[in-house]
Amino acid sequence: MFGLVVLMAPSAARANLISNGSFESYGGSGFNSNIGAGITDWTISGGGIDIVDQSFWMAAEGETSITLGWVGPATISQTVVTTAGQAYDLSSFMAAEIFGGSALRTMDVLWNGNIVGTPSFAYTGQGPNNMGWTQNNILVVGTGSDLVEFRSTTFDQANYGPALDGVQLNAVPEPATIAVLGLGILVLSRKRK
């Protein structure tokens, strides 16, 4: 019984604190959304976003992704409840809108208004079935209530921005927790012999 409890505790710590991180919930159907419309649990500012379903290209997770630019560069943000002092892995997938635009797509990732990452993606002719999604991971520390933002820094005439999907915020287990987990696995494996 002890080993089972140890094995379950870390999985609870891996619960994603971001709501609607794969953008599957939005106010309707179709491709475009403008400032403040559409994506559940997120705030949109700037030039608006495009909501993209699989009829245009494959998402990194689920069936929907977004681009951070409709009539100009956009920002999407969400406030999350965290544990003060706890380390978190902020992860997301990035690609490029495939219908045109500059070769390099860039964005800032902000945590409580501070830039904590500046991921970029090289558009080299990716297509709807091979978007080339790349995962970005950033280590952040919770304060109790934290603002997560993704802000396009891609400025081109056609407003083809970076694509975003699969946003997650997961607590990073402390080394002591990992050691206890390893011990629990060792105990279970010895009992099975």
Image (cartoon, grey):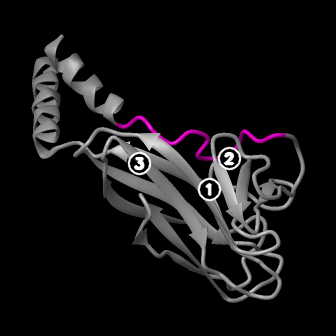
Mark 2 vs 1, N-terminal side: 2
Which image quarter: residue 191?
Answer: top left
Neighbour class for label 2 at 10 Å: few (<14), some, many (≥20)? many
Question: What residue would you read off at disc 2?
Answer: 23
Q: Which of 188 and 133 is in front in this view?
A: 133
Residue ID for mark 3: 146
Q: Which amino acid does label 3 sit on?
A: Asp
Q: Please give the residue where the numbered disc 1 appears in the rendered image.
A: 165
What secondary structure is marked by label 3?
A: strand
Residue drawn at (40%, 62%) of the image: 137
Query: Is 187 located above or below residue 159 in the figure?
Result: above
Residue at x 90%, y 50% (from the top left corner) = 30
Q: Quadrant of residue 66?
A: bottom right
Is 23 one of the magenta-colored residues?
A: yes
The answer to whether residue 133 is visible is: no
Nearer the observer, disc 2 or disc 3?
3
CA gap between label 2 and label 1 equals 7 Å
**Real-space CA distance between mark 2 and mark 3, rounded to the nearest whole angstrom:** 20 Å
